[in-house]
Amino acid sequence: MSDNTPLHLGQASSLPASPEEAVLDYVPNPRGQSRYMVRFAAPEFTSLCPVTGQPDFAHLVIDYVPDRTIVESKSLKLFLGSFRNHCGFHEDVTVGIGERLVAEMKPVWLRIGGYWYPRGGIPIDVFWQSGAQPDGVWIPEQGVASYRGRG
């Protein structure tokens, strides 16, 4: 986590070599007096299978209710892109992204849905959240349908 000076915003930034090397920037919440939800959708997320090294594809949806900071979207995009060369099981990747965001940003609440495309003929969906949904905040469904193939 960088200090309050964003590393990536307004700067040329290259894709980090790994999620561990990626720096996520956080900026002060401009509406800290209000409770609201933020959604990021990454419909073309990729990582690598830790067994075969083949690419895995997912549609990630990250919902969070910010507290004092919000994640800067360019740094999040670079962080997610750093998984392109990262080997990890779907569960580890999905939950790991959520846990890192919670540990660094300290939102009121966060959930992540990893809607993974079939591997070996079986789609795998992974869901994680940091706790109970907060009262008084509109939390819509993530809106990603279960995998249906060509049907």
Image: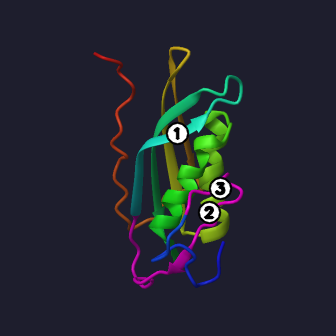
Q: Which of 10 and 45 is in front in this view?
A: 10
- Which amino acid lies under the numbered mark 3 shown in the image of this protein? Glu
| Mark 1, other Cα within 10 Å: few <14 / some 14–19 / many ≥20 | many
- Kindly tell me whether residue 72 is visible in this rendering: yes
Residue 18 among those drawn in magenta? yes
**What x and y, as percent, mark residue 13?**
53, 66
Which residue range is magenta in the image? 14-37
Residue 107 drawn above or below residue 20? below
Q: From this viewpoint, which residue is outermost toward the left?
A: 151
- How far from the left and from the top, in percent, is residue 70? 49, 73
Residue denoted by label 2: 102
Could you say which quadrant of the image residue 68 lies in? bottom right
Q: x, y percentage for residue 9?
A: 48, 75
Q: Helix, strand, or loop for circle 3?
A: helix
The label on residue 46 is 1
Query: Residue at label 3?
Result: 99
